[in-house]
Every structure is written in structure tokens, then in C-alpha cells.
Amino acid sequence: MKIYVSLLNADKLSLEQEIKKLEPYCDGFHIDVMDFHFVENLAFGISTVNEILELTTKQIWLHLMVDNPAKYLHLNLFKLRRNDIFSFHLETTHNKTVELISEIEEKGLISNLYVNPESDINMIKPYTVEIDQITLVATRNPEFSEKKFVEHVFLDATYDKLENLIKNKKEHNLKYTIAIDGGINLDNIQKLQSLGATEFVIGSALFESKDPVEFLKEIKKR
């Protein structure tokens, strides 16, 4: 199991201190980039992402909620390192998903495809041969960090999609791993892990806890 800290939930005025404090206890940091077009929010511009990259040696998970993620990759706008994660949404690839995955991997990055709660899991099946990692979003509006894991609406659907992807992976002997982003906490992580998820993005539960370091230590025991 790998745990990634969502910096969207961190104190933006103390990012360096937060990163240094949490770095020894997590596997990496998750950064949302939003353009106010694909999602109705703005977060983490290019310069800020590159400054964060200089603050840590841990793996960076870059989640692009933008209209054209390929543009950012073509122009090498982010100073990503080998084995950092480059995430995108199928709706933003303009029917060039395979080409984008190939370019991500040619640059030595890990390709990650995000699946929103309302998306049909079968839409991504054609790309599961090439993709390194698939992320299931477990909240209604992933662009807003204050949204919680909405159990009565999305919990069963998330579990169903996770089981579907595990079955697909086994049947076709595929390489992808499965991650969960949204509302992960001490209560639900164990079941999600038992079903086959191996990477988790944690934000609200971590930064709302009394002691984020102790929270990370505890969740790593699960």
C-alpha cells in the first residue's frame, strides 16, 4: 500500500513546512492542477508545482484537471522526474488517449487515468492494456477538496468499479494498479485495500486530524 498526501488540503502559506514534516511518513505528494475550464476551480500553477518538486525527493503525483493535458506534456512545462505520476481524464484527451499514454511513458513517467464517479467504467477498458495506473474518484465533485466520501451515493459504486477493474486485470493479465482518490480515512481504507486498491490519495482526513504525522503512521499500519 502506498499513501500520497494531497497538497490541495494543506495550508498553502506553509507548504514547505508541511512537506518537510510529512515527507518521512508518506510515499509521495499529490498535486491537483486545475484550469477553471475542465473544472470550475483553480489550483497550483506551473511555477508552484515546480517549486514543490524542488522541496522533496519523494514521488510526485501530478493530477491534471485541465482541458488539454497533452499540451503541458509536449512543452515539458513541469520538471517531473522519472517515475513521477502523470494523471489525466479521458474526457480531455481529444481522442488521442493512446498517443498521450505513449508519450507519458516515453518520458519515463507513470501514466494514470482518472475515472470520475459518473463515468462508465467500460469507457476506459480499451486503454487498460497500455495504462500503468487507474484512479477511481470516490466523491461527487473531485475538484473541491471539502467534499467527503459520500457513502450513501458513491460507496457501493466505487466498490463495484474496483471489483470490475480487478476482474478485468486478472482475466487479461494486465499491469495496471488501482488507486482511490477522495474521502479516504481510517474507516474505509482497509476494505478498499482488501478488494485490490494499492494506492491512496489522502487529504481532508489527514489535515483535519489532530496530528497529521500520527494519522499517517496509523493509516500505514492498516
Image (cartoon, rainbow, N blue to C red):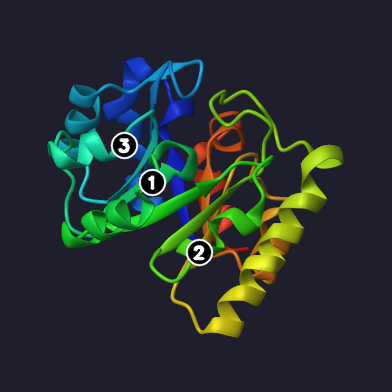
> Which of labels 2 and 1 is toward the front?
2
Name the residue type under label 2.
Answer: Pro
Secondary structure type for disc 3: helix
State the residue in front, 134 or 32: 134
Q: Is residue 147 left or right of residue 198?
A: right
Res 132 quadrant in image: bottom left
Image coords of residue 139 (percent x, y): 67, 36
Disc 1: which residue? 87
The relative height of residue 63 versus residue 12 in the rendered view (above or below) is below
The relative height of residue 19 versus residue 108 in the rendered view (above or below) is above
Q: Is residue 140 left or right of residue 13?
A: right
Within 10 Å of disc 1 (Cα), the crowding (few <14, some 14-19, many 20+) is many
**How far is mark 2 from mark 3, CA to CA?**
19 Å
User: In terms of sequence position, does the residue under pointer 3 or pointer 1 come before the other?
Assistant: 3
Picture residue at 54% right of the left edge, 57% below the top: 124
Image coords of residue 163 (percent x, y): 71, 67
Disc 2: which residue? 126
> Which of labels 3 and 1 is toward the front?
3
